[in-house]
Amino acid sequence: MFEDNQTPSNAGTQILTVSQLNQAVGRLLEKSFALAWVSGEISNFTRAASGHWYFTLKDATAQVRSVMFRGRSQYVDFNPREGDKVEVRATVSLYAARGDFQLNVEAMRKAGVGNLYEAFLRLKAKLAAEGLFDDARKRELPDFPRTIGIVTSPQAAALRDVLTTFRRRAPHIALVLYPTAVQGEGSADKIAEAIHSASRRAECDLLIVCRGGGSLEDLWSFNDEQVARAIAACRVPVISGVGHETDVTIADFVADLRAPTPTAAAELAAAPTDDWLAELEDLAHGLSHQLRRQMDEREQTLDWLAHRLQSPSTAINHHKLKLSGLAIRLSHATSSPVTAARFRLDHITNRLRHAIPDTRMARARVTAQATRLHTAFSQREVSRQHALASAREQLELLAPQRTLERGYAIVSDGAGKILRRPSEILAPQRLTLTLAGGKTAIDISAAMPED
């Protein structure tokens, strides 16, 4: 007999389906190529209804199909367009359904920001190794800050957002502005000096370092080592509110708390006055209710204990009577049931002795039937095995692969449609030939006229 993945003429050789082959090649590619950055130009860009991105990444001499799934594409901070020069972080894979080599893109950035990003990663690793990002060194924010400092540009929209938020939520808090440039040459030194000034003056309970969103270059001052060390050395807790929600800077990692936006930083710095008053009122109401409930429970417990309190002699007599009754019940319970059970057991034993049938003849008939059934199943299995071997031989003769091995080929166009007539071949056109040994692509520059 042959296994399912063997043929009678080639026993022991595994026959792979196309799906199994493509899946095996895909796994091999994923294991052989680690996650890497690849640069190129976007072409044939398509946004599917599912949110996935499909495009071709190419350079002057080559191209590769690429896909970026919705779970990753939503973190890209720009809208890719045809012709954009980008850098993608991707894994190499094979789309098994079509046998297409492709890149699975994990991240995308515009070409040219790679050097800045590498510098960002190096500084991040350096400061992390020094422990500046450790949660253990970060401080809790004060619950009731009286004065809050703001390090930002006086002309920044972020300052207006922060002031509006404090005016709406906590107008009682005093605000101190430490003005500084937040973008451009020398801005990192000025930001660090403003933070040091706030720390030296010690007039604030909390410090907010913020600015609005922008490109990686616009936010680069907040990726400066001087700014990071100034935040780490500040004597009061620092909230970083730089950029939009997707923007991340070194200042965010060093700060005691990171806010996604400047407005969020102001909201995290101080809870609304109305919320505190409402919470105090709720706490007072809850405390009063809890005290009343505890008093009611204690009074009820006292009544219950008073009801249970009785003379020790009365309790002893009660237990004596109870013990006497239990002894009488125990005596009856251990004698009468045993006698009745013995009588029932004798009666059942006699009935069982007369009711047991003679099963010897029935056993012999069952044994004979089992022998006949086993013989019939064995003969039927041998017959089906012969039929299966014959069907396998016929199927092997009709296999498409055998036709291809005789020199035939399958011609299909770029959409995968199989071409059967010369009139379907247009020029220019790229065709795919499926041969016995695999697939190849040919370009048709001119079609041969029909006879």
Image: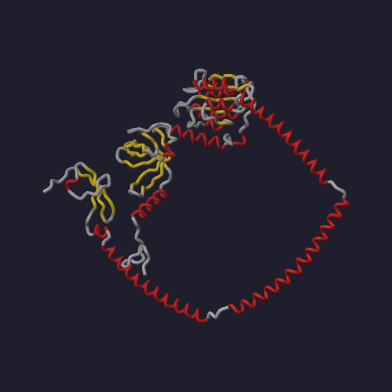
| Residue at 24% across, 44% down | 430
| Residue at 26% across, 44% down | 414
Q: Along the line of sight, which residue is nearer the eye, 297 or 26?
A: 297
- Above or below 219: residue 89: below
Q: Along the line of sight, which residue is nearer the eye, 107 or 361?
A: 361
Q: Is residue 372 left or right of residue 336?
A: left
* Quadrant of the snapshot with the N terminus: bottom left
**Residue 88 showing in the rendered view:** yes
Q: Along the line of sight, which residue is nearer the eye, 433 or 255?
A: 433
**Residue 226 showing in the rendered view:** no
| Residue at 26% across, 61% down | 398
Q: Which picture quadrant has residue 140?
A: top right
| Residue at 72% across, 31% down | 288
In percent of width and height, residue 155 lies at 50, 18
In percent of width and height, residue 287 lies at 71, 32
In percent of width and height, residue 16 lies at 35, 58
In percent of width and height, residue 115 lies at 43, 33
